[in-house]
Amino acid sequence: MVGLSVGEKNFIKGGIAQDLRNDGRKRLTYRPIYVETGVIPQANGSARVKLGETDVIASVKAELGKPRVSHPDQGKVYIYVECSPTAEPSFERRGGDELSTELSIALERSLLGGKSGAGAGINPASLLIKEGKVCWDLYVDCLVISSDGNLLDALGAAIKAALSNTGIPRVQVREAASSDEQADVDVSDEEFLQFDTSGVPVIVTLTKVGRHYIVDATSEEESLMSSAVSISVNRHGMICGLTKRGGAGLDPSVILDMISVAKHVSEQLLNKLDSEIEAAERANEEEP
Amino acid sequence: MALKISPICRLFVLLLGNGFSTAGVGIKFLYTLLSPDSNIWDYTWGHGTLDMGRNVIATVCGVVERVNKLVYVRSLRARYKPEIGDIIVGRVIEVAPKRWRLEINFSQDAVLMLSSMNLPDGIQRRRTAIDELNMRTIFVENDVICAEVRGFQNDGSLHLQARSQKYGKLENGKLLKIPPYLVKRRKQHFHHLDQYGVDLIFGCNGFIWVGEHVDVKDATVEDQVNKSDPQNTDSAILQGSSEEPTSTSLEIRQYICRIANAITVFAALGFMVNLEAVTETVTLSLSLNLGVHEMLEAEFHVQVAEQEVERRSKSTRRK
C-alpha cells in the first residue's frame, strides 16, 4: 500500500465530508459488482466476485462426514480465507496469515451464528442426512486475488453466490445391519439439490472516516479510517452478525445509527447481488 | 491490399502507426509492404527484434516503430524511459542526507538534491548544515512533488531539479497512475483549466496530477502557508472535524473527480491522454448528465471510444 501525502489525505477526507468521494461515488454507493459463477468446475459450487478492483473467489466443496456428538442433528460448515500474495506485496509468505484468520473468523461469525448454530445464516440442519450418523460437511474456501479495500463485503457476496451455485448430490441411505456401523450411502452422480440461499445474509461494512460513514471503502479510504463495523443482514432485515475493527472507540448511539444505515443499504445490495447472481447463472446455462 | 513478397524480403513489418498494436502473443512475424527491390539488409534492427538469418522476428508484443532506417518494436507495458527536460510527478519515499528519493515508475528511484531545490526564503546561498536538518519542513515522506529531469548519473540513477516556481509540492488533489506511453512529450505539461478552476499536470512518467488550482506565488509566501497548514490540520483532525483551512469547494471537487475519471477511462481504453481529449470527454459527460461515478461504467467507455473514433477520422480527413 503506497502512502498518501497529507494533502491527499485531507482531500479524501474533505470529499467524504462533502458526500463526493474520490471516484465520484456518494457515501452510501457501492462500486459496480460483477459476479461470475461456476468458475471452478471440480467444486460443488463456486463464484468469483469483483467489487471495483477487489477480486475474490469462493468455492464450496461438500463431503460426507459424521455430525458432532453435541449436535447430532446438524451438518458442519467450515469457512477458510486465504489472501494470495498476488493481492498485495505485504501478503508474501506469512504476511497474509493474520488478515486471513481475521477474515475467516469474521465470516464465520457473520454467516454461521453461535456455537449452538442458533441464528445462523446457513442452516446446518439442512445438511443432515441421517441423524447422528451421516451429514454433509461444507468446506467453503475463499481466495483473495486482488485487494482494493472492503474484502469482507466481497467475500460475503462471493460466498452467497457460490452457495446459490452449489449442487449437493442426492443421497440414498441404505440401512446398516447394526446401528453402530457406518450407514452406507449411495451418492448420486446425476441428481443435485440446489442449496437454499434465501436465508443467507449479506455483509455490509461501514467505515468511519472523520464524522461520516462510508460504504465500500477503497484501500486508500481504509487507510484513513478510525474504525469499521461490519454487519451481516439477511433478507428479512435481521442482523446475523456484527464485527468491529479499528482502534478508535465508538459511542453506542453511533453503533445503533450504523446498524440502521446498514439495514437500509443492505436492501439495495441484496437486490443488486441477487439479480447479478441470476444473470450469471443464466449465462452459465446458455453456454454449451 | 496485395502484399508483394519477394523471396529476398522475407521480413515483414506491419507499420500501423502509434496507438494501434500488433495483436498476438510472444514471438510473432511482422508483416509489411516493401517494394520488391528493397533489401532487408537496408534496415537496422533495434530493440525488440531478433535477426534469425532468413527472417527477422519480433521478440516483444507491441507497436512497431520506424525511424528512417531503424526499425524497432516498442512493448506496451514498458516502464518509463526518462529524457532530460521531462516534467515528472513523483512521490517522496525517503528523506536522505542532502537529498530526497522519489518514486517515479522508473527502474530506480529518482533523486532530488537539496541543492536543486529552492530554499524557503528564496535567497540563493550555499546550503548549510541547518538547511539539511530542516529538510523535513520542505518535503516529507509520501509527499507528491512535481519536478524536472536534470540528468543521469554514471550509475544510471536519475537526478531531478525543482528550481522554478511551478515545481514543488502538490496538494489538494488526486494523483493518477497510467501507463507512461500514453503521455506524449509536448511543449506544455502544466495545464490550468480556467473554466473549472483545476490544475492538470501530465507527468511524462505516467503520473498525472489533478488538483485545485494554486496560483504560482512567491516561494516565501507559499511556504509560510504550508508551514501553518500542517499544524492547523493536525489539531482539526484530533477534534474529529473534517474541515481544514484550505477546503476544496464541492463544485471544484466535482470537476476534479470528472477529469480524473475521464483520464481513468482513457487509460483503460489505451488512448493517448492530452488536454483536448480530456476536456472533450468531460463536456461529453456533462452533456449526457452522467453522475460522476457513472463515468466509470461500461456504457460511457463505449461512448468515449466512439468519440475518439470521430476525432481520429476528422484528423485524418484534414490531412
Image: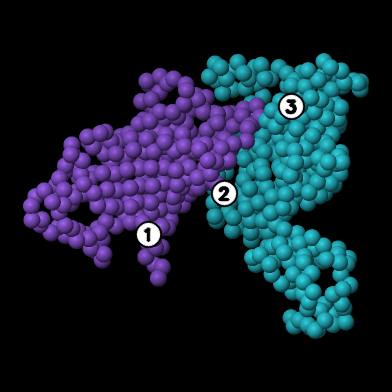
Q: Residues within 10 Å of mark 3 (few under 14, many from 20)?
A: some
Residue B33: x, y in percent? 79, 77
Can see residue A77? yes
Q: Which chain is cyan?
A: B
Secondary structure state at the residue bearing disc 2: helix
Q: Position of residue B36 (x, y in %)?
A: 84, 82
Q: Residue at x 59, y 22 (%)?
A: B243
In the displayed structure, would residue B214 be above or below residue A149? above
Q: Which part of the image, by quadrant, shows the N terminus of chain B?
A: bottom right
* Disc with the residue nearer the chain's start (2 vs 3): 3
User: Amino acid under label 2?
Assistant: Leu
**From the image, which quarter does the C terminus of chain B lie in?**
bottom right
**Residue under numbered circle 3:** B95
Q: Chain of mark 1?
A: A
Q: Which residue is mark 1?
A: A42
Q: Nearer the viewer, mark 1 or mark 3?
A: 1
Q: Are marks 1 and 2 on the same chain?
A: no
* Crowding near the residue tagged with mark 1, few <14, some 14–19, many ≥20 C-alpha atoms within 10 Å: few
Q: Residue at x 28, y 36 (%)?
A: A113
Q: Quadrant of residue B201?
A: top right
